[in-house]
Image (cartoon, grey):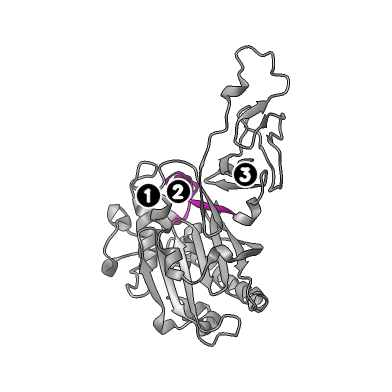
Amino acid sequence: MHTEATGADAAAATDLDHARALPARYYVGDEVLAMEQRAVFARSWQPLAHQDQLAEPGDHVVGEIAGVPVILVRGRDGVLRAFPNVCRHRAGPLALCNGKGAHSLQCKYHGWTYTLDGQLRSAPEMKDVPDFDVGAIHLPPLRVHEWQGLVFVALGNDVPDFDEVYGGIAEHIAPIDLSAMRYLRSVNYDVDCNWKVYVDNYVEGYHLPHVHPGLNKLLDYRAYDTVLSPWYSLQSSPLRNSSDAYGDGQAFYYFVYPNVMLNIMSGRLQTNRILPLGPDRCRIVFDYYYGQDAQAQARIVADQDFSDEVQNEDIAICEAVQKGLGSGFYAPGRLCPRRESGVWHFQNLLRAAYAGPAGEHA
């Protein structure tokens, strides 16, 4: 049986011309995933909502980051706030689903009630309990940032500044204005592969001619380009053989570390958030947004079947790769410098996280 290289060299960062992929051991096992929740996901900005979902006071959205239940809520003062969706009493949920116009946040377990800015207001049958001070109990605030109509949350302060992570994207895609687009629908795809397998697949166009015949006709593979920034990579291509829905513009595919994808064309935004469900299973949360111009309906119709086709192609190859990684017959292969710089970039960011204080030395 073939075995992968072991020791520090197998997972060490190298220059692109000599780079190898991550060892298979990082794609299997509960211990690696637990480490990644601490070292990767808990130290990142995660998109949890669109501004349309949080337009009025009391509007709220629930989600999860690195295993932490989170609630986003618009306050009476118009300010967006985020908190752990965890009551300070005995950890009950403050909301079980998204909602509109709530006057307060009430725990679904024992009814402890908080104002929309996180201050405990009342606790049933606790009025005469010694040394119990309602005013001293407050939900711990999380960091919130609104960008291009999307609302992001970070669990702590050990996360890069938002503008450092997403800076330059809005300017590069201009005149496309993502904030002018409106949410249409969401589709979840559950895939039998490690979350990194799906990301590895997304950040390179090397597989386009072999896996995506339909998409390859739409994009110009010869002009397909990848540009790296500190926290994201951009793959872009001129559109060709496109329908009237998309015209002859540019397709932008942004991957923002660690698990966010922005698929942008004129009048259309798709966001993907890759969520680990286990060491060999993940969920792709796929949200569709469209401009409000005359071509919007044509884009919507063109997208429905085509997006499913591309996703099903990616799912099939990613599930096959996961089996290969778990076979015991995989040793980390050399990357193609021309086509896989995005893989090298992503995996080097992971290597840095693994070697950091919340990870383990790779």
Compared across the picture, whether 118 is left or right of 128 comes to left
Tell me whether the residue at label 1 lies in contact with that at label 2, contact meaning CB atoms closer than 8 angstroms: yes
Tell me whether the residue at label 3 lies in contact with that at label 1, contact meaning CB atoms closer than 8 angstroms: no
Amino acid at circle 2 = Glu
Amino acid at circle 3 = Val
Q: Magenta stretch?
A: 27-50
Q: Nearer the viewer, residue 202 or 131?
A: 131
Which is nearer the N-term, disc 1 or disc 2? 2
Q: Which residue extends farthest front?
A: 77
Which residue carries the number 2 mark?
A: 36
Q: Which mark is residue 353?
A: 1
Secondary structure type for disc 3? strand
- What residue lies at 35% left-to-right and 64% top-to-bottom? 344
Q: Is residue 298 magenta?
A: no
The N terminus, quarter of image: bottom left
Q: Nearer the viewer, residue 150 or 68?
A: 150
Q: CA distance from mark 1 to mark 2?
A: 8 Å
Amino acid at circle 1 = Ala
Secondary structure type for disc 1? helix
Q: Position of residue 93 (x, y in %)?
A: 66, 37
Q: Mark 3 Cα within 10 Å, few/some/many (few <14, many 20+)? A: many
Which residue carries the number 3 mark?
A: 73
Q: Closer to the camera: disc 3 or disc 1? A: 3
Q: Is residue 164 above or below residue 57?
A: below
